[in-house]
Amino acid sequence: MKQPVPREISERIPLMKKEWLPLYNRMGEHSHAPRWNTMCGDRLFKGDLEYVRGFAAGLESERTFTGPEPSESIIEWCESMKNRSHWFESKIAGLDLKREWHLVPLMRRSDMQSSLEYILPYDANLSRLVVNPTSGTTGHPIPAPNHPAAVGCYDPMIQYALRMNGLKSSCVGDKVAAIQVCSQQKTIVYHTVHSYLDGAGFAKINLNENEWRSPESSALYIKDMAPVFLSGDPYSFLDYIRRGIEYRPGAILSTAVTLERALREKISGYFRCPVVDMYSLNETGPVAYSCPDDPSKYHILPHDIYVEAVSETGEPLPEGEVGKIAVSGGRNPYLPLLRYLTGDRGAVSYGKCSCGETSPTLSSFEGRELVLFRSRGGGIVNSIDISGIVRSFPVYSFSFLQRADYSCILKIDAGGEMTASLANRMKDGIEALFGEGVTVEPVREKPAAGGKFRPFICEVE
């Protein structure tokens, strides 16, 4: 008799099938599995899965990008949102969007932090809402609301980007499609299966020794799971290499911070497989992926967004001119985007690429930097761990500086007077990462306007 699907699994994976259980259990009960600290699932219903499949079909068939102006579909979508969102109603009322798009005010991260209820469509059904706070890698933590169907669309976008970069192996069926590798002091770790991938497995692990049963467990677990690809941030892959983990997947998907050339060469040389850098934010979902012919440029990935480079005042910039990146559109029913400034910079150009992609190209991209800090004992501190501490407090934005003498300054904008209790608790959290003797001075300060905001700066040689 086949094992029934346990309730605690079906609640998180409503479309879970009995035939997917052996892989699910093998991932979770392996003798070298990490100490799982949470359960997770795609929460997709039948209608959601049909939506994701429709999106996947459009991702392949609707890659018609007309030029620098917003497409008819984006204009129509904005007009429809005007009757559903107070934000859209107030920002585009009376405008002819085809002729006056440049007059639409820019949407900023601070707007999401302070006016989310005005952006959220007032007819939205909140029963399916999930919240995944951003890591704050840009210094602006945001509690981004999302919907399982919108999150489910990540799978086809990732598959598209990997395939365009040369991954030939299928991620569908009775196999582990991916393992997300982290290297942090503390994070959630879990295993699951994805309905869109017909039960293929996914796990998020942390290389921190405290998460494993023995020093060799992480390497043995990854080897036995044999994921088709590995995902993670560049720092995690460097730690993977440092630990001498030998498993080489079919592809590497790098996210969170920009994969600089030297890092790409090191990672590519070690894994000897396609290395894909994905530009993605919680607020937008995946935006672009690195070109297989020239990884220094990125191709717009989804077909349902409009990406533009704009000036400080919101004027669209000519093709090839570097400016602030703004995104409109998307599929998140709880967070419609209208000229949303991502906090990154780049130039947008058009025309078919030598790799075969027809979508617009981001070049001269200035994204989130990988900044590593050092404790007095010589240990490396990941900036993501700093973000994780800060985002647990009511903070609008922050910046973190480590001076050459190892002292640290944390500057925050808490939206009001900062209490001594708040300052001391943040100080204690940061000192836990860097050890005793490190001075941390929380100071209420808003980031300077103009230019690119650098949330993390390290002056230690």
Image: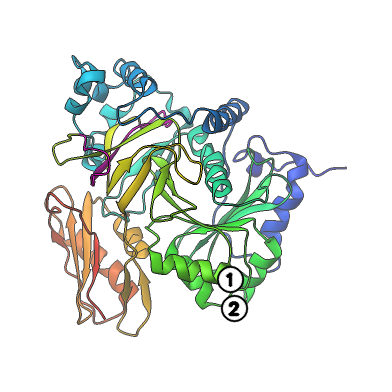
Q: Residues within 10 Å of mark 1 (few under 14, many from 20)?
A: some
Tag 2, which secondary structure?
loop
Looking at the rendered image, the quarter that the N terminus falls into is top right
Q: Residue furthest front?
A: 354
- The x and y percentages for residue 310 are 21, 39
What is the count of numbered marks? 2
Q: Find disc 2 in the rendering and name its residue.
A: 215
- Disc 2 residue crowd, few under 14, some 14–19, many 20+, Cα 10 Å: some
Helix, strand or loop at mark 1: loop
Q: Nearer the viewer, residue 218 or 297?
A: 297
Which residue is the extreme one toward the right?
1
Residue at the bottom extreme? Answer: 377
Q: Marks 2 and 1: in contact by CB < 8 Å?
A: yes
Specify the quadrant of the image occupied by residue 273.
bottom right
- Which is more toward the observer, 297 or 1? 297
Relative to 302, is 177 above or below?
Answer: below
- Residue 268 picture location, percent across and down: 51, 66
**Colour pattern:** rainbow
Q: Callout 1, which amino acid?
A: Trp
Q: Is residue 247 left or right of residue 292?
A: right
Q: Which mark is residue 371?
A: none
Q: At 17% across and 26% down in the image, what residue appears?
A: 103
Residue at figure coordinates x 67%, y 57% from the top left: 28
Which residue is nearer to you in this view: 415 or 104? Answer: 104
Residue 271: % across, % down: 57, 67
In magenta stretch: residue 317:
yes
Along the horizontal axis of the image, is 217 left or right of 291?
A: right
Q: Which residues are magenta?
A: 316-335
Using the numbered discs, state the Cα–Cα distance from disc 1 to disc 2 in whole angstroms.
7 Å
Give the amino acid at mark 2: Pro
Residue wearing tag 1 = 212
Is residue 360 at all visible to an observer of this figure? yes
